[in-house]
Image (cartoon, rainbow, N blue to C red):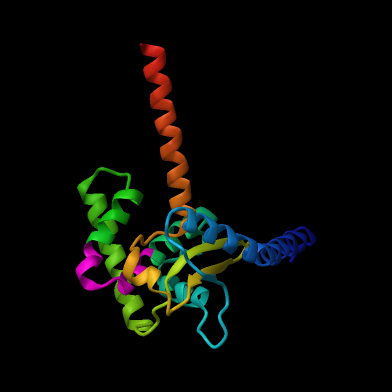
Amino acid sequence: MSKRKRIQRKRRKSDAERNEELLPKHAKEVERRRLAAGKPTKVILSPKGMDSLSDAISEILSPFVLPDASPDDYGRLVVVAIMAWNAVIVPPDKRQASLQEALNLVVTDTSKENRKHFEEFLEELMERRHQLFPHNKRWIVDYVVTDLGDTFHLSIMSGLPDNPTFEQKTHSLLPESVLSQMSLWQKLRARWRRLRTITTA
């Protein structure tokens, strides 16, 4: 390995370590946003005696991650895997509505064929989740991905398994960071529409 590559790898590793150090702060911010939205939630990072959700999501995705995947590619896969993971926890009578709500937010392509492919991929991930981790009921609320050069470091934030907020009250399958980005985009789009109305009046 060249000196340049060693330096890059060391820098990326320190980035991952720094992200791990910032996770508690990120978790508090997620709690604050969810409380403001009327969804009080206790977010946990690495609960003692429980399996790693980061490892679980990585295992679910393992057949689908290409060797040359970019951080953005991997991040998108993680979002779909989180949707699949959370969907399995939602009560069957509310699952389809939750899936359709999430799909309407993330699938921007209006092509019916592309949406069908996305839904089939989501169903495949749900099946893998059900087969590999059928008894894990922890709800995933957010994630952080760090590019390490030859691999990715994934950190997962989840809710306490005995917290009814996730399973009974709210059924948004998407991670909090995705929802907050969409909320910002919706605000910007609404602001642009108001500006356009004023300038064309």
* On-image quarter of the C terminus: top left
Depicted 56 relative to depicted 41: above or below: below
Residue 57 lies in what quarter of the image? bottom left
Q: Residue at x 43, y 52 (%)?
A: 179
Instruction: Please report the bounds of the magenta region as a residue range.
Output: 83-96
Q: Is residue 79 visible?
A: yes
Classify residue 52 as left or right of residue 21: left
* On-image quarter of the N terminus: bottom right
Residue 95 lies in what quarter of the image? bottom left
In terms of secondary structure, what is the magenta stretch mainly?
Answer: helix
Verify whether residue 93 appears in magenta: yes
Q: Residue at x 34, y 76 (%)?
A: 128
Instruction: Where is residue 168? Give x, y as percent.
Output: 32, 70
Depicted 137 relative to depicted 199: above or below: below
Instruction: Where is residue 51? Give x, y as percent.
Output: 50, 83
Q: Which is nearer the eye, 27 or 128?
A: 27
Q: Which is nearer the eye, 190 or 10?
A: 190
Depicted 88 relative to depicted 120: above or below: below
Q: Which is nearer the eye, 97 or 117?
A: 97
Instruction: Where is residue 102? Give x, y as percent.
Output: 32, 55
Q: Residue furthest right?
A: 3
Q: Residue at x 36, y 85 (%)?
A: 135
Q: Is residue 85 visible?
A: no
Classify residue 191 as left or right of residue 100: right
Instruction: Where is residue 119? Give x, y as percent.
Output: 26, 60
Q: Residue at x 47, y 47 (%)?
A: 181
Verify whether residue 160 appears in magenta: no
Q: Residue furthest top?
A: 201
